[in-house]
Amino acid sequence: AYEIGVRLVGSEMCIRDKYISGGHCGSIASAICMRYYYDYVSTNYVPSGSIGQNALIALMQQYVGSGGTTYSNLDNGLDNYFNARNVNNSANAITSFSFSRVKTQINRSRPIIIGTTNHPTFGDHWIIGHGYFTSPVDGNYVIVNNGWGNNNVWIEPSTTYLDGTIHFTN
């Protein structure tokens, strides 16, 4: 079956204009997702003083850390953040990649954090899935914000380079 590309409404919001060097991709990915939730789910996801990208990234660093975050750092840190914000949500870290899982989250109108390992472009990195494309002719692609200021980047969903996901229950 052929599916046209599916993207989240507002997925172009909160694009990093510059990358903060030093391994902050976990807090950047978390901040982009929380800003999406703030804009499209509930304003309870982000305190009013932390709406700007730098303030929100700094806030997320307090919960998920910086400088080489792991699945456990993001999973536990985001759960602690949700509890602190008193929002009914939880993070689910799965250390294997599934294109089907990405499609499910996008179809639920939710972003998904994707971990990369030894990727030829990203190396070990966190990116944010916000769309997908699949066709029998052109193959499958995940559409991501790469956390480096580039949105709508199309990547092949290779389990060689994509090693897992973090998605949210609500």
Image (cartoon, rainbow, N blue to C red):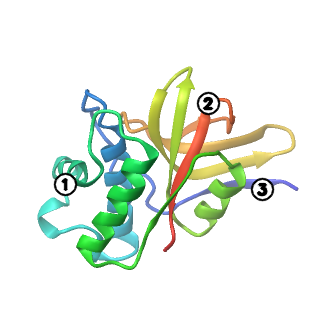
Task: Out of 140 and 2, give the one closest to the viewer.
Answer: 140
Residue at 69% of width from left, 34% of height from top?
158
Name the residue carrying label 2.
161
Which tag, 2 or 1, sits closer to the chain's start?
Answer: 1
- The correct choice, above or below, for 146 with respect to 132 in the image is above
What label sits on residue 113 in the rendered view? none
Q: Nearer the viewer, mark 2 or mark 3?
A: 2
Residue at 36% of width from left, 40% of height from top?
69
Quarter of the N terminus within the rendering: bottom right
Name the residue carrying label 1.
59
At label 3, the amino acid type is Glu
Task: Out of 10 and 88, give the one closest to the viewer.
Answer: 88
Answer with left or right where residue 130 lies relative to residue 18. Answer: right
Name the residue carrying label 3.
3
Residue at 42% of width from left, 36% of height from top?
150
Residue at 73% of width from left, 54% of height from top?
4
Residue 33 seen in render: yes
Numbered circles on residues, count: 3
